[in-house]
Image (cartoon, rainbow, N blue to C red):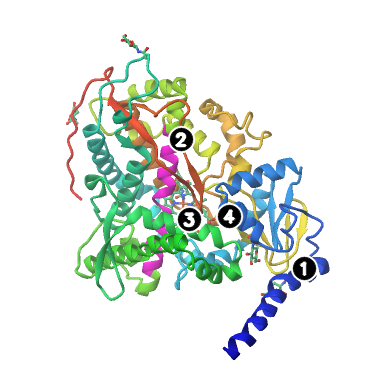
Amino acid sequence: MGIAVLTFPLVGAYLAIVWLIWPIVNYFRDPKGLRKYQSLFFLSGITDLPYCYVSSRGFRSKSITEAHKNLNAPILRIGPNNLSFGDVSAIKDIYGHSTQCIKDLKYSITGGPHPNIFDVVDKRKHSEKRKRLSAAFAIKNLVNWEYKVADTTARLLHAFDQRCTAPLPSNCTTPAKDELTIDFNHWINLFTIEAINVIALSSKLGVLEQGDDLVTAQRMDKSTYKAHYRKAQNKAAFATSHFVWDYQNFHLLTSISKLFPRWRRIWGDAEPWKDVIYHQTVTRLNRYQNGEKLDDFFASLMETKSGEPYNLEFGEILGDVGAVIDAGADTTAIALTQVMELLIRHPAHLKTLREEVDAVFENETVALFDKVRNLPFLRACLDEAMRIIPPTSAGLPRRTPPEGAMILGEWIPGNTSVSMTAYATHHDPNVFLNPEEFNPHRWMDPAERKRMEPYFIPFSTGGRGCIGRNISYLEQTIMLASLVHRYEFALPSPEWKLERFEAFNLLMGKMPMKIWRRTDVPKGDLAISSGI
Ligand code: HEM
Ligand SMILES: *[C@@H]1O[C@H](CO)[C@@H](O)[C@H](O)[C@H]1NC(C)=O
Ligand SMILES: *[C@@H]1O[C@H](CO)[C@@H](O)[C@H](O)[C@H]1NC(C)=O
Ligand SMILES: *[C@@H]1O[C@H](CO)[C@@H](O)[C@H](O)[C@H]1NC(C)=O
Ligand SMILES: *[C@@H]1O[C@H](CO)[C@@H](O)[C@H](O)[C@H]1NC(C)=O
Ligand SMILES: *[C@@H]1O[C@H](CO)[C@@H](O)[C@H](O)[C@H]1NC(C)=O
């Protein structure tokens, strides 16, 4: 009792100094000269909490883009040590191949004990990892892996066939409730989860046959249990995005949040994510150790092309497997859900796409990559959907080197957190005419495409840009072509809205849909053969 009486005021005084007095003093001391930049909120120069609040509102990239525009500020202070840029010229300075900036401390804070390819900060360690994995992501393997994507696509089409309804009368725009037989976003997530596990680990989870995301998770003590794959991954990202923006206090804020039942439940749902990754990794490692020769991404973590073993530590293997299956599923699912919604809402573009796709289909059910990979309007639709709402819209935090760096023609002092959102980049009217308009045709003129491409950054850019870009296009291209060739779709109503929440990626809610077989194309039957 006596101790508590003493401790409370002491702790209180300590917190007041650390959280209140020192930040205010520092704000006025202004050792880095950041006070000259406008603040996102009036307290942003003193505390990170306003940014945590913006993040909790659900679409921080859009909020920040609007703030840059409304305040007419190319540089905004979003935290005491953090600047957001709102001018596309900053992209190459912050993210380009020759940038001096490195990934910000955030990545070490959310990363596991072994840095993985995604969150490792050290440039030398990163390039070692990147080199190893690049072998697996090379364009040659991409084509070798087409059969994995095609097979997984066929499995999704099989599930959709079973949920097809009668055609919607042409004078009707609102299908009956019981005709909305699929949640497209749910199914497409099951597809990308299955696809990345097959490509990376030769692992067939069976979620497309089950129709849900229940898989095996495994604790370090080898005991196993069933867990929801996507739910665990999403809740982990959701919870993290609320508290991570005060890096130093992330773990403290997380602990405090667990005092509240709602957050305790959310963190609890997130808990199995690491055990799912652990199970997937040890299962594949066992197969390798038992001498099975499998053609997948994991194999390139084990040996060089000529068969020399790398002998990596288990922690490193676990980290990089986790990075790939974490980064490789929901992003592509978001892109596909998004493009599907936009096409349904823009029937003229859907019609143009169908004509292009139908012209190359023969008797196949699943699109052949060779026939569809260079269809310009198909690619234009995919790119335009990722432009208008990038699946990873966020400003990816980078850190200036200790000696500082030139960004947007300004000298930015050392160790400052800097970023520019893909959302703001993709909505700059000087680069993308009428940026709010979904217009795939803007990509059809090669000269125009060339002009826009440096500012089209859904996969980020530079040395830390996405390594899975080509795999994602492989999946998206085959899937979208196959879907529009085989089916017609309808959303619940013209007024229906897709719900989103920006965690790290732009998570999406349900997309209920009516689906039926097209009557104007020959009905090929679906043969599902799987050798995996
Ligand atoms: C539409 C789909 C995708 C989008 C929008 C996307 C976006 C991104 C972005 C923006 C980054 C940079 C992240 C940062 O700086 O923090 C990134 C990195 C990464 N992505 Fe993707 N990605 C997609 C698909 C994939 C796929 C399919 C894979 C795996 C097969 C993958 C694996 C990775 C990895 C490993 C990194 C880290 C690369 C590095 O730091 O060297 N991504 N992705
Ligand atoms: C649509 O057309 C059919 C006949 O073609 C008619 O029976 C039906 O009432 C119409 N529905 C609406 C919503 O107008
Ligand atoms: C800004 O960066 C500092 C580290 O430089 C970090 O502690 C803080 O949490 C960051 N704040 C935001 C809003 O990103
Ligand atoms: C399509 O036709 C080709 C040759 O005309 C044939 O070899 C192939 O098996 C057919 N594929 C399907 C799915 O029917
Ligand atoms: C940046 O960090 C380095 C190492 O942590 C430190 O030595 C240096 O003084 C810092 N520079 C600034 C401008 O904060
Ligand atoms: C994707 O493929 C293109 C060639 O089509 C290649 O230039 C590029 O380096 C590949 N990107 C990645 C990240 O593997």
Whether residue 303 is visible, yes or no, is no
Q: Position of residue 456 (x, y in %)?
A: 57, 41
Q: Is mark 2 within 8 Å of ligand 1?
A: no
Q: Position of residue 319 (x, y in %)?
A: 40, 67
Question: On the rendering, which quadrant does ligand 4 occupy?
Answer: top left
Q: Is mark 1 within 8 Å of ligand 3?
A: no
Eye-nearest disc, 2 or 1: 1
CB contact under 8 Å: marks 3 and 2: no
Q: Kindly identify the amino acid type of the residue bearing the numbered disc 3.
A: Phe
Q: Which residue is mark 4?
A: 396
Eye-nearest disc, 3 or 2: 3
Q: Is tag 4's residue or tag 2's residue first in the polypeptide sequence?
A: 2
Q: Kindly identify the amino acid type of the residue bearing the numbered disc 1.
A: Ile
Tell me the magenta residue range: 317-340
Measured in 3D between alpha carbons, the distance from the residue under mark 1 to the one under mark 4, in whole angstroms, is 27 Å
Above or below, 72 against 22 in this view is above
Above or below, 334 against 38 in this view is above
Q: Position of residue 93 (x, y in %)?
A: 67, 53
Q: Is mark 3 within 8 Å of ligand 1?
A: no
Measured in 3D between alpha carbons, the distance from the residue under mark 4 to the one under mark 2, in whole angstroms, is 22 Å
Q: Is mark 4 within 8 Å of ligand 1?
A: yes
Eye-nearest disc, 1 or 4: 1
